[in-house]
Image (cartoon, helix red, strand yellow):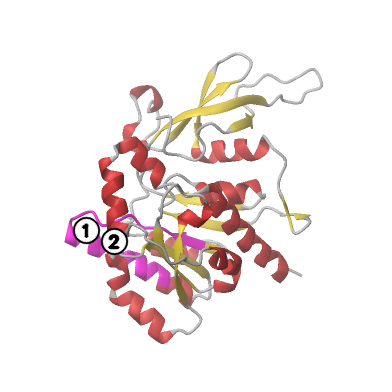
């Protein structure tokens, strides 16, 4: 695919595993551009040789000078993008690499890339990226979330309803269980989903809002960040101060806007490629999100 992921068309610098050292013994980074990708479910035979039971998305890089093509996994492609350009400064200081963002239902990874550009570690979880990252079947997800080294913030962006009530209910139960776990551990979370999604009618939402006064919810319109049309989502977080500027910018203006349902129907009617593009975050939103979170973390760090 030549669309549907934020890494497509990014310039990268990477060190091939079989690269030849230079005369001084160092290795030379190759310059290339990511020209496309395969979601894990669509991998062709050439990309699945020797991969074992877990299938992971593959990104195709084309070398700038020779036109040679290389296959990269997501983690390598993310690092290669970061290595190809100077790290962005945040509040006058280059951020040190740390476990900042865990992006669940990461999809096209805009948030993760914005954090990587600032030198912050981000990890992604999504079924289109790896065959073992299906929250519906991943019974060890909550245990790992609690046991593994903590992330500064975990962002959930669950997909819209599938039309299967039992499947949708199970996914919602697991999302709310993860949110409750993180809040109980004193860790930061953000939950984002279309404002009309059934997720918000779940008893988990009512329970959290009624029992905890440090959790806030607001509507956000991606059009305010450069989306070509109105796309309204609801955001819940226990760190509203981290996203204060983003929230202020996203304040809705009174106007005639298509509802979430109208937007979804329009996207479905427009064809698969355009629908994928519509569902990606605007770059300005991802950048503002990363700046807000990293800025808050740096202010809190002695």
User: Between residues 176 and 213, which one lies in front from this camera angle?
Assistant: 213
Residue 60 % position (x, y): 48, 27
Residue under circle 1?
167
Q: Which residues are magenta?
A: 154-179
Residue 302 colored in magenta in the image: no
Q: Secondary structure at mark 1?
A: helix
Query: The N terminus is located in which quarter?
Result: top left
In the rendered image of this protein, does residue 205 appear above or below residue 222? below
Q: Secondary structure at mark 2?
A: helix
Residue drawn at 30 percent across, 56 percent down: 160
Residue 224 % position (x, y): 51, 57
Tag 2 and tag 1, C-beta contact below 8 Å: yes
Q: CA distance from mark 2 to mark 1?
A: 6 Å
Residue 176 colored in magenta in the image: yes
Decide if residue 124 is on the left or right side of residue 91.
left
User: Between residues 296 and 40, which one lies in front from this camera angle?
Assistant: 296
Determine which of the numbered discs, if any, sits on residue 82 in the image: none
User: Between residues 14 and 92, which one lies in front from this camera angle?
Assistant: 92
How many marks the image carries: the answer is 2
Residue drawn at 53 percent across, 31 percent down: 9
Residue 257 % position (x, y): 37, 59
Q: Residues within 10 Å of mark 1 (few under 14, many from 20)?
A: few
Residue under circle 2?
171
């Amino acid at each position: 695919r030549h669309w549907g992921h934020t890494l497509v068309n990014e310039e990268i610098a990477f060190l091939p595993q079989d690269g030849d050292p230079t005369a001084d013994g160092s290795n030379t980074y190759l310059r290339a551009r990511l020209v496309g990708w395969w979601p894990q479910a669509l991998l062709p035979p050439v990309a699945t040789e020797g991969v074992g039971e877990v299938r992971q998305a593959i990104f195709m890089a084309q070398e700038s000078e020779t036109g040679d093509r290389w296959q990269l996994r997501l983690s390598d492609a993310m690092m290669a993008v970061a290595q190809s350009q100077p790290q962005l400064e945040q509040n006058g200081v280059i951020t040190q690499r740390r476990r900042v963002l865990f992006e669940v239902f990461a999809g096209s990874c805009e948030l993760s890339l914005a954090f990587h550009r600032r030198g912050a570690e981000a990890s992604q979880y999504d079924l289109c990226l790896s065959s073992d990252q299906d929250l519906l079947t991943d019974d060890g997800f909550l245990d790992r979330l609690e046991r593994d080294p903590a992330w500064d913030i975990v962002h959930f962006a669950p997909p819209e309803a599938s039309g299967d009530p039992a499947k949708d209910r199970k996914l919602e139960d697991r999302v709310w269980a993860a949110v409750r776990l993180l809040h109980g551990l004193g860790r930061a979370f953000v939950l984002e989903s279309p404002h009309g999604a059934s997720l918000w009618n779940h008893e988990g939402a009512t329970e959290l809002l009624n029992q905890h006064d440090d959790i806030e919810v607001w509507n956000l319109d991606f059009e305010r960040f450069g989306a070509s049309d109105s796309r309204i989502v609801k955001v819940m977080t226990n760190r509203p101060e981290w996203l204060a500027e983003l929230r202020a910018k996203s304040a809705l203006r009174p106007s005639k806007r298509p509802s979430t349902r109208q937007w979804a129907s329009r996207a479905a009617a427009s064809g698969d490629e355009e629908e994928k593009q519509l569902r990606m975050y605007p770059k300005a939103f991802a950048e503002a999100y990363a700046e807000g979170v990293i800025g808050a973390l740096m202010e809190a760090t002695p």
